[in-house]
Image (cartoon, helix red, strand yellow):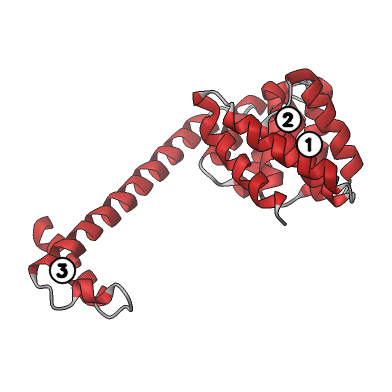
Amino acid sequence: MRLVAFFALAFVLASVLGHLPLIGPLFRGTGILGLFLAAGLASALLTSVGARLVAARRLRSELAALGAVDSPRNRGKMGSLYLMRGRPRAAVAPLEEAARGEPEVAEWHYRLGLARLAIGALEPALAAFEHCVTLEEEHAYGAAMLRRAECLARLGRMEEALAVLATFERNHGPSPESAYRRGRAARALGRKAEARAAFAEAVELARRATRYQRRAASGWALRASVARWL
């Protein structure tokens, strides 16, 4: 029965795709080949939907387990789960409760900042990151400081963003991200030569990145390469 339903879905999918421009000819008039192409797409679609359903069921189970004991720590874990699953708006409330209940824990302020930043609440996000770095300046290996600089830049406070980036680079050395953000801030302040040098530095730092850093570094290098010519 499931096999019949699967091929019925593939047939419907082939019929729909056959009416689309560009890709339509692949599904029209190719007989069994078109059906097999549609079956492959149907399989990929069902796999994706199945994975999402499993992830949603697992999330509900984990949240229910955490909700069995209402404590600031469990609230923080709930918010972190929402954040990791790409639901920052749902993450904000439990992370706010965690930060109020355990104000000395830098992690809750950091994750609250990430959730607020993801939904565009820049001022509240900045407040959370500033609280985090007050408790622990090097939290998340300096990532809290970078996110603080990002908030400041997006709020138009470029000089302050540059000061935070300078502290980060003094403590950790420059990274492709910090150099790129330094270039953006310098350009916004009209310091074009400084900006171009920072973008060039971001590209060079990415080129020298270690293997495990290369994927993230290449994204900042691409942004810097584009920014150099804007």
Q: Nearer the viewer, mark 2 or mark 3?
A: 3
> For the point 84% across and 41% down, which residue is it?
194
- Is 80 in front, or is 174? 174
Is residue 205 left or right of 12 when viewed as pictured?
A: right
Residue 196 position by quadrant: top right
Disc 2/disc 1 C-alpha distance (Å) = 6 Å
Q: Which residue is mark 3?
A: 34
Instruction: Check contact, mark 2 vs mark 3: CB within 8 A.
Output: no
Percent of width and height locating residue 224: 67, 45
CA neighbours of label 1 inside 10 A, class few (<14), some (14 to 19), many (20+): many
* Structural crowding at the residue carrying mark 2, measured as other residues with C-alpha within 10 Å and reported as few (<14), some (14–19) or many (≥20): many
**What's the residue type where badge 2 is placed?**
Ala
Query: In the rendered picture of this protein, how many numbered marks are placed on residues?
Result: 3
Q: Which mark is residue 148?
A: 1
- Tell me the residue that label 2 is attached to: 144
Secondary structure of the residue carrying numbered label 3: helix
Amino acid carrying label 3: it is: Gly
Q: What x and y, as percent, mark residue 38? A: 20, 64
Q: Is residue 77 above or below residue 126?
A: above
159 and 209: which is toward the camera = 209
